[in-house]
Image (cartoon, coloured by chain):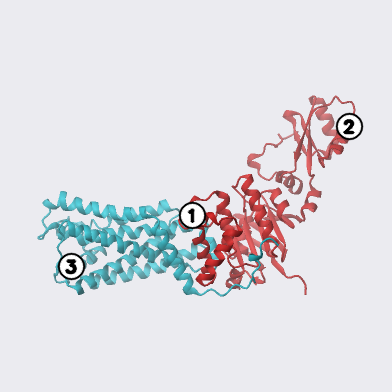
Chain colours: A cyan, B red
Amino acid sequence: MSSPTLALPTAAPAPSRLADWTTMIGRCLRVSRRNPEAIIISLALPIMLMLLFVYLFGGAINTGTAYVTYVVPGVLLLCAGFGCSITAQTVSHDLNTGVIDRFRSMDVSGAALLAGHVVASLARNVVATTLVLVVAFLIGFRPNAGLADWLAAGGILLLFMLMMSWLAAAVGLLTKSPEGAGGFTFFVSFLPYPSSAFVPVHTMPSWIQGFAENQPITPVIESLRALLLGLPVGSHPLHAILWCVGLLAVSIWLSGVLFRRRTG
Amino acid sequence: MAQPLAVEARGLEKSYGDLTVLAGVDLTVHSGTVYGLLGPNGAGKTTTVRILTTLLRPDGGQARVAGFDIERERKSLRRNITLTGQYAAVDELQTGEENLIMMGRLRGLPRPDARRRAGELLERFDLTEAGRRRASTYSGGMRRRLDLAAGLVVPPSVIFLDEPTTGLDLRSRQGMWQVIGDLVSTGVTVFLTTQYLEEADQLADRIGVIDGGKLVAEGTSAELKSQVADARLDLTLADRATYDHLHRTLDDRVVHTDPARLVLGVPTDGSARHVRALLDEIDPNRSQVNKFGLHNATLDDVFLALTGHPAEPSHDEEKEPAGV
């Protein structure tokens, strides 16, 4: 026999499901770290837009505060949405390579596989958001928030990222190719425009106002803005949380259905 | 105790809409043997493997793999098999070592054991040096070896290899054959699919020929070859009259015709003695045969002999015009 090392007993230990989860999360984190393009792209667009809005358009937009201060919550959200939407491509990539069959034939659950992608997405976006905030400070963003406000704003942003990542995972399961999944990124990067992200809603045509006031991104932005600028928050955080939790539940459910459909 | 069966399938069926992919496939594979499922693209090879590895549910039929039912005991079954698919299933952005450690962890090995096992496998598959490089830098052959190693972190009782050498150059293919051959000596059961007769011949104890979702023949390589000639003697004849005359007189001994080029093919074992005897018999006056060529039996020939139609009509250069 030329390979004594292979002649181990064939009784496979029963794998612990926890190890599946941590292993899949570790995998996605490692792969993310080695794909700096994804992070750079998800950083470059929001930062460039922030500079564009602040320096080119900002002078003409009257929001009642320094424009940079008005626009940063919107940019944070754009950054998060854009960054999370990349998850659609990473999930789609896994499904279109043989790796999914290997994992499934090893009895790795779809939940563990997708959780790996979602956690890596959150990690990427926390890094990206922090960098955007640093640039924002450098160009004159001066929030007026205490520690509790920061924590609350961070929590809402994290919840939004979690929802967007799961939604992106569902989209990745739905599309046939990573290129197709890339279309989702495009869609998501437009969603903040008809909201209060860049200009106050009341300056928009009335028929858009209805959408802008009631789309999920507006309460998230308004919550961040109120928390960071020390303004009264009103019912915005409640609406933001309800939207995010609702969409998160739908996305997780949809991911489960789509995963089972895609993988028989 | 009777030798347990590694794979036992009865009447496997699968269709997609009107397209029948499997039309009742029976398979029996004994433990510790290599079974080769041979067939052209679209014959149902991958579908069979996906059903046996629980990735796909059959529309009909039953199967047990490593003693477990493919529908009722999926989890236990999955713990006792590995599948190496047609496309190397490794993460390109992870190193070879990281890929193997990941597989070890997913198979339930504690981290130190997974690391040690990865080292052993890298050495075993001649990847030690490459182990710290990302898999994206690997050649096709290295990737397949890593893929195969990934299936062995915990030795399974049945290994499924779906076209393990498709797309590899000859050298890498021979390297894979060596690796698979060594595996067999460890007593594991191997179920592989291939489009290449030579590959099945080299590796498999028993070969099943699948076509159009049905098993059309089964046996050892020698048994199958006895149904098809090992080789074929192609005779380029002097003129059309000779061609027609010999086609008639040789009748069902003709296994290949190419009227445009006046070529008839007859079976031979390829030995000089047999070729000389054939030439003397067919062309005693040494005036009817201009040239001859030896043609080694291919999958197409096996198919022609077993099913009466060529394996892949799309690139069929041997197609006869109707009415000849």
Dot 1, how many residues are within 10 Å of its Cα: few (below 14), some (14-19), or many (20+)?
Answer: some
Q: Where residue B133 is drawn, which disc sits there?
A: 1
Residue type, mark 1 in image: Arg
Q: Is residue A70 left or right of residue A10?
A: left
Residue underneath mark 3: A228
Disc 3 and disc 2 in contact, CB within 8 angstroms: no
Disc 2 target residue: B280
Q: Is residue B53 left or right of residue A41?
A: right
Taking the spot 15% from the left edge, 65% from the top edge, the residue there is A143
- Residue A246, horizontal then vertical, whole percent: 33, 70
In the image, residue A146 above or below residue A188: below
Of the numbered discs in the image, which one, if any, rests on residue A189?
A: none
Position in image of residue A145 (x %, y %): 16, 70
Asked which quadrant contains residue A191, the reply is: bottom left
The residue nearer to you, when weighing B154 against A94, is: B154
Helix, strand or loop for disc 2: helix
Q: Are marks 3 and 1 on the same chain?
A: no
In the depicted structure, whether residue B2 falls above or below residue B87: below
